[in-house]
Image (cartoon, coloured by chain):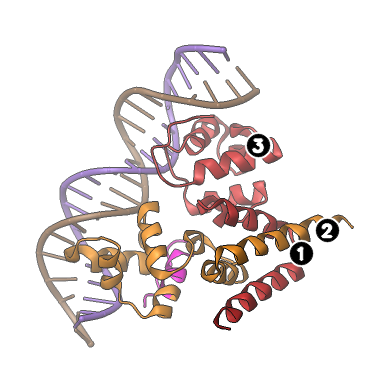
Chain colours: A orange, B red, C brown, D purple
Amino acid sequence: MATHEKTQNPIAKRLNEAMARIGISQKALGIRCGIDASVASSRVNHYCTGRHVPNFLLLEKMASVLKVPVAFFYTPDNELARLLASYQLLPVRARKELVRVSEQLVSSLSD
Amino acid sequence: MATHEKTQNPIAKRLNEAMARIGISQKALGIRCGIDASVASSRVNHYCTGRHVPNFLLLEKMASVLKVPVAFFYTPDNELARLLASYQLLPVRARKELVRVSEQLVSSLSD
DNA sequence: GTACTAAGGACGACTTAGTGT
DNA sequence: ACACTAAGTCGTCCTTAGTAC
């Protein structure tokens, strides 16, 4: 676990969080995302330490393996991160219901 | 409005969406995000047409001007995009309630 | 005013080849 | 096994200088 934090983006933080949750190594994650085994360790470490930013295609693969929405990696707000993480675990019907509730709450703001 | 779509990321789509919602030009958005007026049109156009990907700092500024969470730009799923857009409009108390509801729904899945 | 583009220099990602636990 | 890094290559972003409506 690195503590460099050159960038202001939350990718490294969320990535380490999600990896710890399912207990997967940097190299293993890279390989499961289709990165060649000879460079997987180096590349993923760059992302985990915040030195480099992965492209969208790789972010999608990581999100799929880690069972989070891609947007989770771009969420500095912890509250919203929890919403995104749980959203991904819900069945489609419950997701739609949640969206409905949120938009309902917005509508009721003017009352 | 461009139709190039070189990249698979949803940034251009979401950006155009959010800009149309509040009715702001490409150049005006760039200037309000601190980009020099002489390059604002060119740079923002690159993002709107999907040719280039903005860095996180600029994404944060755009999100602030457009009143959406940064994560909104990285959300291919339309359903989740609606959740994110509405979430941003809610007061803190309502946001927390929404997170609670979502996590509650996840817990009840095992029943 | 508006949207958009080619091209080159500037910058950051990816690979190689390692260290150290 | 594991996490991590310097340095070079190479691909992408940013700026310049425009076109077109």
Circle 1 packing at 10 Å, graded few (<14), some (14-19), many (20+), is few
Magenta part of the chain: A1-16
> Residue A99: x percent and y percent?
66, 60
Question: What residue is at 35 percent from the left and 57 percent from the top?
Answer: A58
Q: Amino acid at mark 2?
A: Leu
Q: Amino acid at mark 3?
A: Ala
Residue at which label 3 appears: B20
> Residue A29: x percent and y percent?
31, 70
Label 3 residue SS: helix
Question: With respect to residue A71, does B110 lie above or below?
Answer: below
Judged left or right of residue B54, residue B99 is right
* Chain to which the residue tagged by mark 3 belongs: B
Q: Amino acid at mark 1?
A: Pro
Query: Do the residues indicated by labels 2 and 1 lie within the same chain of the protein?
Result: no
Q: Nearer the viewer, residue A101 or B91?
A: A101
Q: Is residue A3 magenta?
A: yes
Considering the image in quadrants, where does the N terminus of chain A appear? bottom left
Question: With respect to residue A95, does B5 lie above or below?
Answer: above
Instruction: Determine contact: label 2, label 1, CB under 8 Å.
Output: yes
Residue at which label 2 appears: A109
Residue at which label 1 appears: B91
Q: Is residue B33 magenta?
A: no
> Residue B1: x percent and y percent?
54, 29
Calculate the distance from the C-alpha at mark 2 to the C-alpha at mark 1: 9 Å
